[in-house]
Amino acid sequence: MRFRSALWLLLATAMLPTPAWAEIFVCRTPSGVMVTTDHLSTDCLRYGGKELNPDGSVRRLILTPQQQVEQDAQARQQREVQQQQRRKQREQRALLTRFPDRAAFDQSQRNDLQTPQSLIVSARQRLQRLADSLKSLKQEALFYPDGNYPQELRNKFEENKLLTRQELSLIAGQERDMAHIRAQYAELLPQLKPLWSRQASDQAESSSTP
């Protein structure tokens, strides 16, 4: 009988709701003193503090508004740094895809320079023809020692002068384009050299691994 009563008492005790752990807060007062409370006070929210676990360990820190602002700013800065790192990694992968080695880099530069070089060659050929034409016009002008050239001859001189200026302007523009292309490649090369070295090292390590 006593055993049955003890069993019922044990079952009844087990059915009772488990008491919740009381909340414990350690908060800073306006005077800077740390006090312990069982609720989240206004002082905690304003001056900071911490919430404790039943064993006394810190469950969470309660930040002041200024601390929260600083924490948010730090987290935002960390996200920006991580984004920059990911963006840099994407750019490096793109560079290695486009220029897997020095030979590909040099060939790409030659390809990009080919068009302006061809335009310059053609322009210089036209300049030579214009120079030959100018010689003929000057020979024709010898028939008019007083400089009183006919209108047709004056027009030919003006046309030759205009076309010569255009070809010289075209050459200057293409030379600027070539200088810009070379500058771009010169800027890329210091970025690519360590990437190529790292890639070669990774490949060597991979090939030596059994």
Image (cartoon, rainbow, N blue to C red):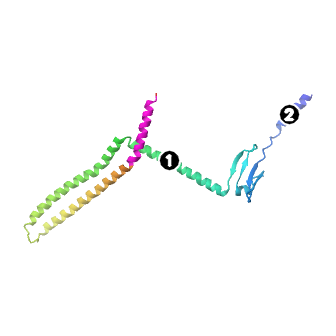
Q: Which mark is residue 10?
A: 2
Q: Which range is magenta?
A: 188-209
Element under disc 1 = helix
Membership of 88 in magenta stretch: no
Magenta: main secondary structure equals helix
Q: State the image coordinates of residue 157 (x, y, percent, origin top left).
A: 16, 65
The type of residue carrying mark 1 is: Gln
In the displayed structure image, the side of residue 106 where residue 134 appears, left or right: left
Residue at x 47% of width, y 47% of height: 88
Tell me what residue is drawn at x 38 percent, y 43 percent: 99
Tell me if 72 is positioned left or right of 192 in this view: right
Q: Nearer the viewer, residue 79 or 156?
A: 79
Which of the two marks, 1 or 2, is nearer to us in this view?
A: 1
Residue sitting farthest toward the right = 1
On whether residue 204 falls in the magenta region, the answer is: yes
Seen in the picture, residue 86 relative to 126 is either above or below; the reply is above
**Residue 24 in the image: x percent, y percent?**
76, 48
